[in-house]
Amino acid sequence: MLELSGITQIFGGVTALDTVTFSIAKGDITGVIGPNGAGKTTLFNIITGIYRQTAGTVLLEGKNVTGFPPERLARLAMVRTFQNIELFGGMTVLENVMVGMHTKSSSGLLACALKMPWSISEERRIREGAAKWLEFTGILDLSEHAASSLPFGQGRLLEIARALAAMPRIILMDEPAAGLNSQETLALAQLIKRIRDLGITVVLVEHDMELVMDICDRIVVLNLGRKLAEGTPREIQENTEVIAAYLGDDD
Amino acid sequence: MKKDFLLFVAFSLLVMAAPQYFRGGYMMNVLVFVGINTMLAIALNLLLGYAGQISLGHAGFFGLGAYLSGIMTTTFSLNPWVAMPVAAFVVGCLAGLIGFPVLKLKGHYLAMATLGLGIIFFIIFNETYEWTGGPSGLSGIPNLQLGSIVFDSDVKNYYLIWGVTLAVMLFALNLANSRVGRALRAVHDSEVAAQVLGVNARLLKVQIFALSAIICSLAGSLYAHTMTFISPTSFGFNFSIELLTMVVIGGLGSIYGSFLGAALLTLLPEFLRGANDYDIIIYGGLLMVMVMYMPGGLVRGIPALYRKIIKPKGEAGHA
């Protein structure tokens, strides 16, 4: 589904990522973990086209997408969510998800402003589609609320609904459980599994080890910009290098 | 949806009925300006209130439309109905070309760049006097004509200008509540989130900049053909700032707000005329008070004030 090879990112003199290579299988939930400063978010920003890496290539479904801007990657069915939730605060919950359907609709500026028949029917389709994803994430009753008024947990669900509305084949989530209480985290785990069951490949950066070990099919461990280990949750839990990196090693 | 449509119909009826109350010629003339300023404020609001991109040079596009229309119909004796779309097309293309590099800038830098743009246009209007007549202006611009009706009186111009203004309003209202309008607001709220959802923010900003310039050009052409005389002072930096004030006072991101802002800033100087030399102080003071106490603009401030007065014990409503 997604193949990374030799991803290197140098900021000034600091090497944030050093020849990171791994691939993500279709239909899996893959967790990317590592101590703070390991380069997880940088890696996400590179995969989703927000940063341009110093070296290395990204293949999406076999296609070389290195250096593609985010809006082009969205059209290739890759979306992401952000660690600090990037909602459109001035819009309603429903409108936020409607923006998610941008790549799945096509009415241009003039067609919209002149209310052409096809743009009216498309608008209806967008509205219905958006409502469907709000129902999927369980926040349909908040449709007409201002997005900025949502508590953090529901904001997270809205961001996921909005990403799903783009009908991705792969979704990247940057710390989806950050800021959630334990009950919300449990619900999130269920939601992520349901997203996988739709046939969508899930990649997540996460600090909540319990969540990662519970739902991930595979785990990639980064430390100081390098890939430290890769494997199933059980393999990772038993990996001495990983344990050393997390508990702190003196050498 | 239905409510929005009814509001627009009610507003249109009010506009069409207004001449019945103002039989006097002078007030009609002022209301013609309200119409033109409403179009301009909507144009700027699409850019600033929806897409979140500032422009301090919009008077330049207004002037460019006016001069292109004026020159084509006087020097080249073109029919005004032909000159207007040609002017709008030229201005749209120009804005698109300028927009690509300029809209890469953000915030204060974008403000500076568009400020410079407006000043360049102003200098061109003044200096190319063999075309524009320079500081002494361009006169003898023909009125618009539809069959045997010549739009040469205040009442006829009122219906002409407001007919177009209502069309522009409907156009903008439709756009605001559509796929493209949502994408614009998304870019405003979080450009990066809009991009990862597939919105081509850069292209969209250029598109809306060009559309905004086209509306300004149209307003400029209509201005030239109703006034029959234009001079550079109407299209200077001061007017760009006045447009910005209309948009902010009226309410960012609200089409009706743009009308309220345009109406207030056009009518206020007329009402303050009685205060003689103090008018400019009162004018400035009122604007300050409004921005301080109605940060959301008139369109949100008036309903909030209404709720406060009607229900003094109810919770203070913040829209």
Image: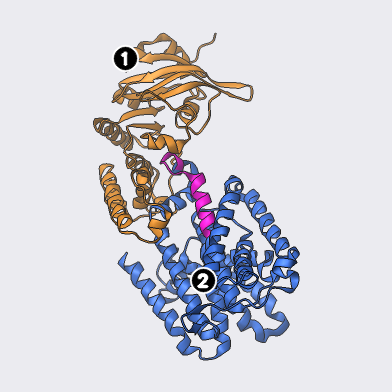
Chain colours: A orange, B blue
The subunit carrying tag 1 is A
Which quadrant would the N terminus of chain B be assigned to in this image? bottom left
Against B158, is A68 above or below?
above
Q: Residues within 10 Å of mark 2 (few under 14, many from 20)?
A: some
Question: What range is drawn magenta here?
Answer: B195-212
Labelled disc at residue B81: 2
The location of residue B24, given as percent across then percent down, is 54, 91
The residue sitting at 30% across, 67% down in the picture is B2
The location of residue B313, given as percent across then percent down, is 41, 71
The subunit carrying tag 2 is B
The residue sitting at 52% across, 74% down in the picture is B35
Q: Is residue A1 magenta?
A: no
> Circle 2 sits in a helix, a strand or a loop, which is it?
helix
Image check: A215 left or right of B21? left
Against B290, is A58 above or below?
above
Q: What amino acid type should be assigned to the residue bearing mark 2?
A: Trp
Residue on which the image places disc 1: A234
Instruction: Let me know if residue B40 appears in the view.
Output: no
For the residues beneath circles 2 and 1, the answer to whether they share a chain is no
Q: Residues within 10 Å of mark 1 (few under 14, many from 20)?
A: few
Marks 2 and 1, how far apart at CA:
76 Å
Image check: B136 left or right of B268? right
The extreme bottom residue here reads B23
Image check: B317 left or right of B81? left
> Circle 1 sits in a helix, a strand or a loop, which is it?
helix
Labelled disc at residue B264: none
State whether the magenta stretch is mostly helix, strand or loop. helix
The residue sitting at 46% across, 67% down in the picture is B168
Image check: B115 left or right of B213? right
